[in-house]
Image (cartoon, rainbow, N blue to C red):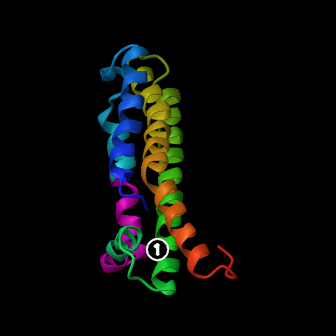
Amino acid sequence: MKRSYPLWILVYLGIAALAWVLAGGLSMYLDLPSLAVILLLPLPLLVATFPLREIRNAFFCVFHHAVDGSELRNALVVFSTMERLLLLAGLFGVISGLIGIFSHISSAEMIGRGIALALLTPLYAMVLMMAFTVPLRAAVRRRIAREAPDELV
């Protein structure tokens, strides 16, 4: 992983924030229920799947060079799982939002809340995936390919 990764993440998030501001204001894109679904729903499943030590080691593998092939393969599994959990949390938000819309079809306020949940949850999932899981997984894959070129990644 390049040392400039944090800088480029800030640039990416800044461009996303600028696009949201230009599209009507940043506050339009902030929704606490959607944030809760994306940030809190995948976490217990990730911790249930991997020991905290393994999750920490996955991040360590990306930024440190003294790791072996098995640690890199474990990191790849952790980041792939994180990505899938974010995707599923986004889908959970879409389905929950649609259920909210259809169950409160006569209330404009509740329809708005349901639409926000249905649309912002996958947006948040995509932002997190593009900022973290995809680049981290790619960095681990590159390292595996460099250190064990015969191995399928």
Q: Residue at x 57, y 68 (%)?
A: 141
Give the overall secondary structure of the magenta segment: helix
Q: Nearer the viewer, residue 89 or 110?
A: 89
What is the x, y in percent for residue 43?
Answer: 35, 61
**What residue sits right under mark 1 in the picture?**
75
Asked if residue 24 is positioned above or below residue 93 in the image, the reply reads: above
Helix, strand or loop for disc 1: helix
Q: Is residue 110 visible?
A: no
Quadrant occupied by the N terminus:
bottom left
Q: Nearer the viewer, residue 74 or 43?
A: 74
Asked if residue 12 is positioned above or below residue 131 in the image, the reply reads: above
What is the x, y in percent for residue 91?
Answer: 54, 46
Q: How would you rate the neighbour count of disc 1 (Cα within 10 Å): few for under 14, some for 14-19, many for 20 or more?
A: many
Q: Which residues are magenta?
A: 40-54
Q: Residue at x 45, y 25 (%)?
A: 104
Q: Nearer the viewer, residue 133 or 49?
A: 133
